[in-house]
Amino acid sequence: MLDPALTYFLLTTREEALQHQQAAGLVVMLGAQSRHERIRQRFQQRLYLTRPVLLPNPRYATPWIHLYESKDNRAYITTMGFNVATFEFLQTSGFSDVWDSTPIPQADTSSSKSLQQIFALVPATTSRYLDFALDILLWTLQSLPDASITIPRSLRQYEYLSSLIEAQHPLLKGVFGFLDRWKTPIFTPGDPEVENLTYSGWYHDHYVSSVAVFDSEGLIIANRTNCPSSWHDARIARPIYNKLISQAPAGFSLLSDTAFPRTERALRGRIIAPLKSGQRLPVDLTEKEAILVLNREIVTAHQAAKWGMRSIQSTFSRLRVPLDANDSLCCQRIFAVVLQLHNLRVQWVGISQIHSVYVSTWYKLPMEKAVWEGFEEMVFGEMRHFDRVARFHVVAADL
């Protein structure tokens, strides 16, 4: 028979052990519940598409397959900005060969919900395909002369481009293109120095700035992209100025707005801009009127630069989605693809307001020109009063 004291000790120890086990079990159970709750909350915040909610087969009966097989120019241009012939030209120019023969690298998942639904692909696959295809597309475009971004090489090219502008603006002699700047939104950079450089106090957000030159056919012939928004226009455009000075023949110039400086000796006569508000005019009435008439021509013609910028930003909606400022290489790659695609689109599809205005069949014959100008006066004469460009014209005021 066990000693009562020993019996009590054993029973107490067993009860304590049981209590410890129960406490440990409770802790484990609470930990599991806490983990499940964290997962549930994380799933509520992490929203993405999975295979069961997409179409069953990404190679059959997806919206993209229906669009692709339609071979309809209107549908292709509405969706991609290119007609059927241009899309197939890109594929047969090396894109398809590289796509079929190169392994697709792994990458992080990014959000492209519309593409995931159209192609019936999960996020990880969509992200890999986008990154992989962008490299191939850039390589393909760099091999196509119609997509190249090059400043004119010969005097004959400059004469032809300037003649297109002079046909509609007789006072603008030797002007062969238009210079302007545009901004692209970016995510807030992680580097404080970069954050400060890219912050725009005017727009209260972060941007990168780019400058492009459009010729009178609507093609981009020079550019500089992905610069901090705090940089002055002159600093961004300096490489373009250098090309203009070294490669353009004497007597040929670009139109710009007043933000681009043109006072240095090497740029005199190379950059033409409207008068600044408050700028002094000659006292002689004849000279004053001549300057104001020329200024109106400059303001009206420079509208073409806005058409070019709008063509890029409206066609390539990727530029409206903030870029990753921490990945400068990716930003440069996107800009390069967009600008070269713009040139290819102008050459092959012919959709460009600059091209439509300056390279117009209405002006091939003198009679057609007279009829067209007369029709414009008959139909649009009353609308000139509401011209949105008119508010930028400088008028003389007596002091």
Image (tube, helix red, strand yellow):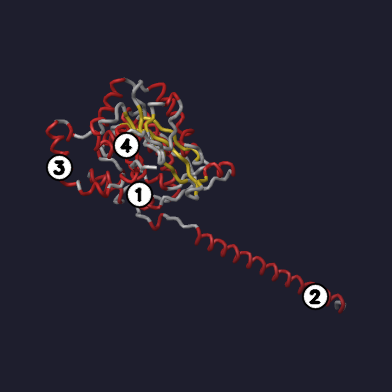
Looking at this view, is 293 or 25 the one in front?
A: 293
Q: Earlier in the sequence, mark 3 or mark 1?
A: 1
Q: Is residue 14 left or right of residue 292?
A: right
Instruction: Where is residue 65? Give x, y as percent.
Output: 29, 47
Mark 3 burial class by Cα count in 10 Å: few <14, some 14-19, many 20+: few
Callout 1: SS:
helix
What label does residue 292 carry, if any? 4
- Which residue lies under the disc numbered 3? 375
Callout 3: SS:
helix
Looking at this view, is 208 or 382 the one in front?
A: 382
Contact check, label 3 and label 1, Cβ < 8 Å = no
Q: Earlier in the sequence, mark 2 or mark 3?
A: 2
- Which residue lies under the disc numbered 2? 12
> Gap between marks 4 and 2, in whole Å?
106 Å
> Gap between marks 4 and 3, in whole Å?
26 Å
State which mark lies toward you, 3 or 1: 3
State which mark lies toward you, 2 or 3: 3
Q: Quadrant where the C terminus lies?
A: top left
Instruction: Where is residue 86? Give x, y as percent.
Output: 27, 36
> Gap between marks 3 and 1, in whole Å?
48 Å
Contact check, label 1 and label 2, Cβ < 8 Å = no
Contact check, label 4 and label 2, Cβ < 8 Å = no
- Which residue lies under the disc numbered 1? 119
Q: Amino acid at mark 3?
A: Phe
Question: Is residue 99 in sight in this rendering?
Answer: no
Mark 2 burial class by Cα count in 10 Å: few <14, some 14-19, many 20+: few
